[in-house]
Image (cartoon, rainbow, N blue to C red):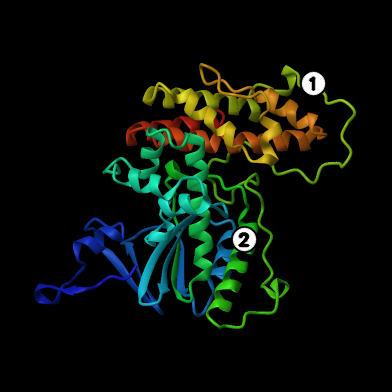
């Protein structure tokens, strides 16, 4: 973000109100740190580590690898050059994984992304765009007009977040600022790709963009900087924040499937264990969503229509019940039916349940008031901590 400083009475330096609001500040005292290529504004005495610099000194790929590879949680702010125009992007990262992104680039808006991915016709986006108003964004309009289901909207927002992140690799220059800070979990999504795979896809984008600009890139992806090993979302977080109730990702399963899958018994879903926690979490989220919409069950069930092929068999026969119950034992049984056993089956089932929970929280929070969403956040945290 570029800010214009205004000298006021007696030489006092002030920021114009629109830029002040855009920086997330509300008139509090601030500290100003001048850095090569970037100015950093932070509330006086603010906690949290940060680093910043020019993308001429470190490419976006290198910055992304550092942030994601070290399992950081915070926001990566970008000011990217696009000819004479500057575009701002903000990428939210939790434990090294991209969970949300926003952009001032019109090409990154939801409508253009829906058209490019073929999910909605341009004429429909244009018609629904006229219905957008304060507190009624395009995604909500598309769901209310029954053009998209809640599950399809979640998929579309995931595609939008992915596109904002990948398009940053194409920028010829700019500045970056990463600040460790808590995230607004109401908008978080779970992308199908891990950050490592996203960065590899971004490197290909960067290569194509350089060729288009007449720059000779390094000869082949094998010469790209080595990517650090990025643990999966199932790994315990590096920070002391409450962890999602799931164990580390299991190693590759055995190639040969068992002759007959073991039937899941009630003893597999032990009281106080992670599967029992997911049952409570789904009921809590459903109850909150049902207070906001009588169609909560249908909206949450729409996710099952958009399950990626890699997880589809795991949710065979699974839906939200009338009180928000989800048959987590069935998910574990389906994992075992695929040929997994023991810890590998449990890890696979828990990972699938986490993906469903991420969507359910996204759908519920975006239909609740701020106070209701905060109450749900506290309840989810209590359950995750064993309450």
Marks 1 and 2 close (CB-CB < 8 Å): no
Count numbered badges in the picture: 2
Q: Identify the residue position indicated by label 1 in the image.
A: 263
State the image coordinates of residue 196 (x, y, percent, origin top left): 64, 59
* Residue 149 x %, y %: 47, 34
Where does residue 65 sit, x and y in percent of width and height?
60, 65
Instruction: Give the side of residue 38 with respect to residue 387, left or right.
Output: left
Q: Residues within 10 Å of mark 1 (few under 14, many from 20)?
A: some
Q: Secondary structure under badge 2?
A: helix
Q: Is residue 197 left or right of residue 169?
A: right
**Pick the front one: 247 or 353:** 353
Reading the chain from its start, which is encountered first: label 1 or label 2?
2
Which quadrant of the rendered structure holds the N terminus?
A: bottom left
Give the spatial CA distance, label 1 vs label 2. Answer: 39 Å
* Residue 316 in view here: yes
Q: Taking 73 as reference, is 225 left or right?
A: right
| Mark 1 element type | loop
- Closer to us: 109 or 321: 109
The residue tagged 2 is 69
- Outermost front residue: 123
Q: Nearer the viewer, mark 1 or mark 2?
A: 1
What residue is rendered at 44% in x and 44% in y? 187
Q: Nearer the viewer, residue 369 or 13?
A: 369
Using the rendered view, name the quadrant where residue 50 is placed.
Answer: bottom left
């Amino acid at each position: 973000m570029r800010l214009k400083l205004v000298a006021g009475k007696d030489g006092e330096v002030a920021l114009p109100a629109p830029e002040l609001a855009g920086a997330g500040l509300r008139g509090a005292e601030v500290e100003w740190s001048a850095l090569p290529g970037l100015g950093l504004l932070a509330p006086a005495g603010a906690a949290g580590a940060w680093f910043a610099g020019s993308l001429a000194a470190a490419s976006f790929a290198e910055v992304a690898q550092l942030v994601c590879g070290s399992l950081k949680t915070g926001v990566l702010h970008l000011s990217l050059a696009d000819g004479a125009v500057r575009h701002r992007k903000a990428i939210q990262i939790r434990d090294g994984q991209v969970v949300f992104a926003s952009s001032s680039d019109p090409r990154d808006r939801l409508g253009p992304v829906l058209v490019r991915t073929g999910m909605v016709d341009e004429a429909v986006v244009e018609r629904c765009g006229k219905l957008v108003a304060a507190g009624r964004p395009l995604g909500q309009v598309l769901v209310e007009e029954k053009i998209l289901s809640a599950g399809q909207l979640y998929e579309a927002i995931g595609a939008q977040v992915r596109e904002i992140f990948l398009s940053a690799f194409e920028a010829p220059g700019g500045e970056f600022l990463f600040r460790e800070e808590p995230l607004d979990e109401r908008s978080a999504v779970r992308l199908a790709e891990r950050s490592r795979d996203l960065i590899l896809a971004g490197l290909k984008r960067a290569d194509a963009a350089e060729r288009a600009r007449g720059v000779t890139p390094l000869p082949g992806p094998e010469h790209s900087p080595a990517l650090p090993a990025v643990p999966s979302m199932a790994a315990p977080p590096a920070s002391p924040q409450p962890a999602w109730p799931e164990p580390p990702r299991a190693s590759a399963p055995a190639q040969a499937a068992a002759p007959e899958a073991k039937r899941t018994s009630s003893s597999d879903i032990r009281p106080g264990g992670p599967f029992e926690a997911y049952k409570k979490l789904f009921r809590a989220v459903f109850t909150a969503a049902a207070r906001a919409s009588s169609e909560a069950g249908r909206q949450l069930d729409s996710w099952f229509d958009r399950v990626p092929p890699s997880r589809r068999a795991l949710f065979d026969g699974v839906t939200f019940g009338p009180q928000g119950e989800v048959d987590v034992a069935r998910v574990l049984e389906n994992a075992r039916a695929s040929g997994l056993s023991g810890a590998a089956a449990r890890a696979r089932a828990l990972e699938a349940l986490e993906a469903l929970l991420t969507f359910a929280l996204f759908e519920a929070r975006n239909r609740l008031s701020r106070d209701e969403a905060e109450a749900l956040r506290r309840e989810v945290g209590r359950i995750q901590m064993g309450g």
